[in-house]
Amino acid sequence: MKPIAERSTNYGAVGATGHFDFQRFPPKGFEVVQKRARIGHGRPRYDAAVAALRTWKVQRLSGIEIDIVGTDEGSVYRPVGFDGTEATRAASIEPQQDFGPDGEPFLQPGDSVDQRIRVAGIQVHAPMRVIAVEEEPTTHVVIIGSLEGHPLAGEERFTVEIADDETVFLHFRAIVRQEAWWAKLGSPVARALRRRYHDRFMDVLRSIDVR
């Protein structure tokens, strides 16, 4: 199989989690996941949650091993986005290297990652790519999509939001489909395992250190 940086996504609906009505009209064959949780209060909590998202800390502290493959390209093309109800094409962007409070580089669009988890004593590889990063004054979004070789197919969208009263929320959206034959065969187990990690993401952001 190709090196992770050269692999394509294993699903066609790239950017679908950004559609305003994605829950009602998911891509055919995909399950919709949507969660929302209060993860704390105040700008320091918001900044800590953003840093955790941008440095893969959310996945690592949830028990997922991570190997990062950065992009070497000078610019990264962002795929389908949505402006209201209309699909749009975003322009190429120049990745700008930022760093978290620990000096760890922030992930950028185009970065790939090999996620590894253990299931019944067997190590499972789940490669993904950063599809887009969207930053606004009160929200920060990271979208990652599955690559060829991932046992599942789909996309995850993490949105950290700070409300007017400075309550901080995590909104999690995903579309997912069992891709590998053994994932299809063990669908109930795969679904339960997936739910466990999604819940851990919420717990990690509630407990992350605030500096």
Image (cartoon, rainbow, N blue to C red):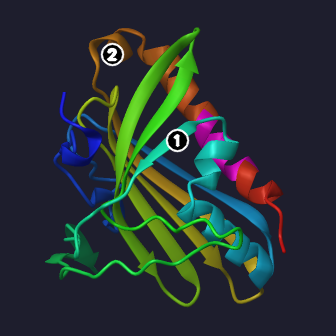
**Magenta: main secondary structure:** helix
Q: How many other residues sit within 10 Å of disc 2, few (<14), some (14-19) or many (≥20)? A: some
User: Which of 95 and 103 lies nearest the eye of the viewer?
Assistant: 103
Q: Are marks 1 and 2 in contact (CB under 8 Å)?
A: no
Q: Quadrant of the N terminus?
A: top left
Q: Is residue 198 magenta?
A: yes
Q: Is residue 162 magenta?
A: no
Q: Image point 79% across, 59% down: which residue?
A: 208
Q: Secondary structure at mark 1?
A: strand
Q: Quadrant of residue 198?
A: top right
User: Which of 28 and 107 lies nearest the eye of the viewer?
Assistant: 107
Q: Secondary structure at mark 2?
A: helix
Q: Quadrant of residue 3?
A: top left
Percent from the top left, x then y, of residue 124? 45, 21
**Residue type at tag 1:** Ile
Percent from the top left, x then y, of residue 28? 20, 40
Q: Quadrant of the C terminus?
A: bottom right
Is residue 77 toward the left or the right of residue 151 in the image? left
What residue did someone put label 2 on? 184
Q: Image point 33% across, 15% down: which residue?
A: 184
User: In the rendered image of this protein, does residue 208 appear above or below residue 199?
Assistant: below
Percent from the top left, x then y, of residue 94? 28, 82
What residue did someone put label 1 on? 66
User: In the rendered image of this protein, does residue 124 appear above or below residue 27?
Assistant: above
Magenta segment: 197-203
Q: Image point 18% across, 45% down: which residue?
A: 8
Q: Earlier in the sequence, mark 1 or mark 2?
A: 1
Q: Is residue 26 visible?
A: yes
